[in-house]
Image (cartoon, rainbow, N blue to C red):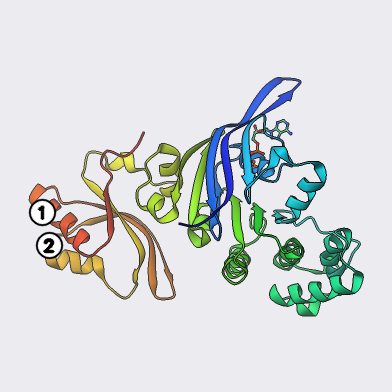
Amino acid sequence: MKEKIIEIVDLTKTFTTKDGEIKALDNINLTIHKGDIFGIIGMSGAGKSTLVRCINFLEVPTEGTVIVDNKNLATLNNKRLRELRRTMGMIFQQFNLLMQKTVIENICFPLEISGVSKSDSKIRAKELLELVGLKDKENAYPSQLSGGQKQRVAIARALSTNPKVLLCDEATSALDPNTTRSILELLKDINKTLNITIVIITHEMAVIEEICSHVAIIDESKIAETGRVQDIFTHPKTAPAQRLVYPQGTRVEEYLSKRCCRIVFDGSSSYDPVISQMILACKTPINILFADMKDIEGKAFGQMVIQLPSDEVLADKVVRYLHSRNLAVEEVDNYVE
Ligand SMILES: Nc1ncnc2c1ncn2[C@@H]1O[C@H](COP(=O)(O)OP(=O)(O)OP(=O)(O)O)[C@@H](O)[C@H]1O
């Protein structure tokens, strides 16, 4: 059993504004284990940023407990809280670099304010620049860098104090898809090589699928569903999870009069023509209603919704065949809220 690094118990956060009270988080319970890449996903306004700010006590919860690395944050004085925050690096959508400082000065800055000498800070900053692939940019200014490079500097800066946890608030939302992929690869690498727990706040399911091991879906201030990404992706139970897993435009209700099933491909060989083989084996045509597949290094990931034959015996045969190929199969005829 992995050790817990972050534990949130019965957390509620209410903001008082001139227009009344806003309950941004409502009775949140969440456990994140050491070494996880944990995604927190939800629509705009669901409460994601507030939750991440409660994890490092930049926002103090109205009710409930936050335990990080076995410390109850509510019991820490300001000095110990600052020390604890140093064990949690943070990166943001807008990078938040100091524009008047060079890349290396940006990375040295948190080290120097935590009391590390100028020369030691520089040595550490150079190591980090190498780690994030920006060795040749130490004297550049942020304005001379691309979005992806700026985020790499922000990651290096966040790692400078050797954190145990890296909190990423929409860290790839301002980046194009290729740059997003390369930043996610870098985060995966950091998680693996430095054994840093990563918490990723996002509104994009693709980010979760790409790198997270676990996910919590937050909807209207509450946790709707939490668990392993693979389990939630293959069997989303709640309406908010289903909305995220079924891509926009999948109007499953159109097919409700027919028996349909959703097949999840989670890494079988792309070269294995499983659908053609199924048609040959079951001797029946099937209608593909929706497919959203991608090939990653020769493996198929994604999902497909097929309409089953109207003959019940044949339909059962198709479902049995798919199960026999070890694919995750879910009938969707009773899906839709
Ligand atoms: N300091 C604040 N004062 C008042 N209300 C706030 C404050 N911070 C957040 N809220 C409100 O709390 C709710 C949750 O906001 P939060 O920023 O956590 O959502 P989010 O899921 O991160 O959204 P987004 O993806 O758009 O950033 C919103 O209704 C927001 O208006």
Q: Secondary structure at mark 1?
A: helix
- Residue placed at 63% from the left, 62% from the top? 176
Q: Nearer the viewer, residue 197 or 181?
A: 197
The x, y position of residue 287, in whole percent, is 24, 55
For residue 163, which quarter of the picture? bottom right
Q: Secondary structure at mark 2?
A: helix
Which of the image's four quarters has the N terminus? bottom left
Of the residues shown, which amino acid type is indicated by label 1?
A: Leu
- Residue placed at 53% from the left, 38% from the top? 29
The x, y position of residue 245, in whole percent, is 42, 49
Residue tagged by mark 2?
282
The x, y position of residue 27, in whole percent, is 55, 31
Please report contact status of discs 2 and 1: CB closer than 8 Å, yes or no.
yes
Q: Residues within 10 Å of mark 1 (few under 14, many from 20)?
A: some
Query: As drawn, is 143 to the left or to the right of 286?
Result: right
Query: As drawn, is 113 to the left or to the right of 215?
Result: right
- Residue placed at 88% from the left, 61% from the top? 115
Of the residues shown, which amino acid type is indicated by label 2?
A: Cys
Residue tagged by mark 1?
314
